[in-house]
Amino acid sequence: MSSAARIVLAVCLGTLSAFTFTRESKAAEIDNPPAENQPAETVKRPSAQSDKPSVQRGLDKEIERGVLQMVDNHLPELKVLLDQLRENEPRQYELAIRNLAKSSRRLQAAQKRGEASFDLEVHIIQAQTSINLLIAKLKVRDNKKDREALLEATRRFEQAEIDRAEYELTLSQSKLAKMKEQVDAMEKLLIEKQSNMDETIKKDFQGYLRKSGRK
């Protein structure tokens, strides 16, 4: 599997066991070369010819479009990697899209709840993506700058989670306040009905008699 595939899968799946990262470029090929005198064709690689039909059959275009729009708008660091994956590793591209679709659905659901909820979810997903990339880099090569960036990304993620929790608490408190108003109004109406019960019975009774032509 190419490094592009490993990078994207590490970010999408949140796992790093198959991930490698080079000093020169995130997208540079770093697979182990064939042993000396070993024919190149013995290095196992996915067949593009066999993969592409599977991707065309299995990948929902609407899902793919939603994911790519999310990447373009909010996760630009993944765009080049996904482009390379689509060209060279169709099956891994499909897997990456399917897993990124979970984040895309979260954003779509948040958007229905309002702009504030959407923005909060974007911040969480962006921080998660940064964390996964930085963990992957540090797994292969320790680097002070990446450590600092990981710490900052962790802070951003935790703060985004707190911000979302505070927002959801505010919404719940607002709903609770409205429900309390409704309960108070219903209690007031009930008390009025109970206190006026005898008078209401007499009034209604006389009205029913008049309808029947009796007095």
Image (cartoon, grey):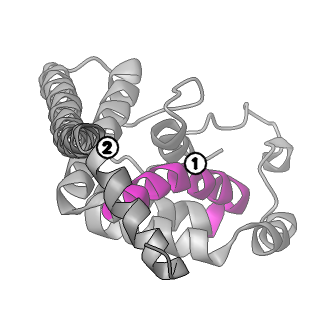
Question: In the image, 23: left or right of 178?
Answer: right
Q: Which mark, by number, is residue 198?
A: 2
Q: State the extent of the magenta-drawn residues as a range.
A: 87-111
Q: Dividing the picture into quarters, in which one does residue 24 lie?
A: top left
**Which residue sits at x=34%, y=48%?**
25
Q: Is residue 146 left or right of residue 105?
A: left
Between 68 and 32, the residue placed more toward the observer is 68
Which amino acid, by three-letter code, is at mark 1?
Asn
89 vs 86: above or below: above
x then y, percent, for residue 16: 51, 26
* Magenta portion: prevailing SS class: helix
Q: Mark 1 highlights which residue?
A: 99
Q: Position of residue 173 (x, y in %)?
A: 18, 35
Instruction: Name the spot of residue 78 as percent of width and height, x first.
Output: 38, 56
Contact (Cβ within 8 Å) of mark 2 with mark 1: no
Q: Nearer the viewer, mark 2 or mark 1?
A: 2
For residue 95, side relative to residue 163 (left or right):
right
For image coordinates 81% across by 37% down, the residue present is 38
Q: Which residue is found at the position 32% from the left and 63% from the top?
A: 111
Q: Which residue is drawn at 45% across and 40% down?
A: 11
Residue 142 location (% of width, % of height): 27, 17
Say which quadrant the N terminus sits in.
Answer: top right
Mark 2 → mark 1, Cα distance in angstroms: 66 Å
Query: Is residue 17 placed above or below 214 in the rendered structure?
Result: above
Q: What residue type is labelled 2?
A: Asp
Residue 84 colored magenta?
Answer: no
Q: Answer few, some or many: residues within 10 Å of disc 2's Cα (few below 14, many 20 plus, some between 14 and 19).
A: few
**Which numbered marker is on residue 90?**
none
